[in-house]
Amino acid sequence: MENGHGKKRTVSGTDIEEVKKLNSESGLTYNQVKQLLGGQYSRKK
């Protein structure tokens, strides 16, 4: 959905592009951390 300013927003008004930008700057995801820790654990055995 687009508003009059050309920004994509959800029905609740969330700016989709802003969320994507913030997510990309936030660091590792939960699954990336799990994979990293799992790899370190398996190498110690």
Image: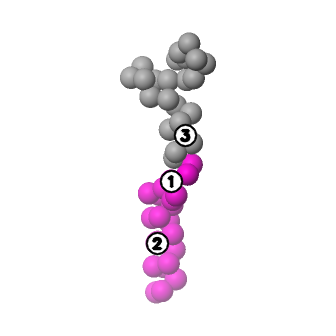
Where residue 15 appears, as percent x and y from the top left, is 50, 29
Query: Overall secondary structure of the magenta stretch?
Result: helix
Other residues around mark 1 within 10 Å, as few (<14) / some (14–19) / many (≥20): few
The residue sitting at 57% across, 49% down in the picture is: 24
Judge by depth and name the residue closer to the eye, 10 or 22: 22
* Mark 3 residue element: helix
Q: CA distance from mark 2 to mark 1?
A: 18 Å
Span colored in magenta: 24-45
In this view, 38 is above or below 21: below
Most extreme residue toward the bottom is: 45
Where residue 23 appears, as percent x and y from the top left, is 51, 46
Question: The disc labelled 3 sits on which kind of residue?
Answer: Lys
Q: Do the residues under discs 2 and 1 have CB atoms within 8 angstroms? A: no
Of callouts 2 and 1, the N-terminal one = 1
The residue to which callout 2 is attached is: 37
The residue to which callout 1 is attached is: 26
The residue sitting at 45% across, 64% down in the picture is: 34
Q: Do the residues under discs 1 and 3 have CB atoms within 8 angstroms? A: no
The residue to which callout 3 is attached is: 20
* Mark 2 residue element: helix
Question: The disc labelled 2 sits on which kind of residue?
Answer: Leu
In this view, 44 is above or below 12: below
Q: CA distance from mark 3 to mark 2?
A: 25 Å
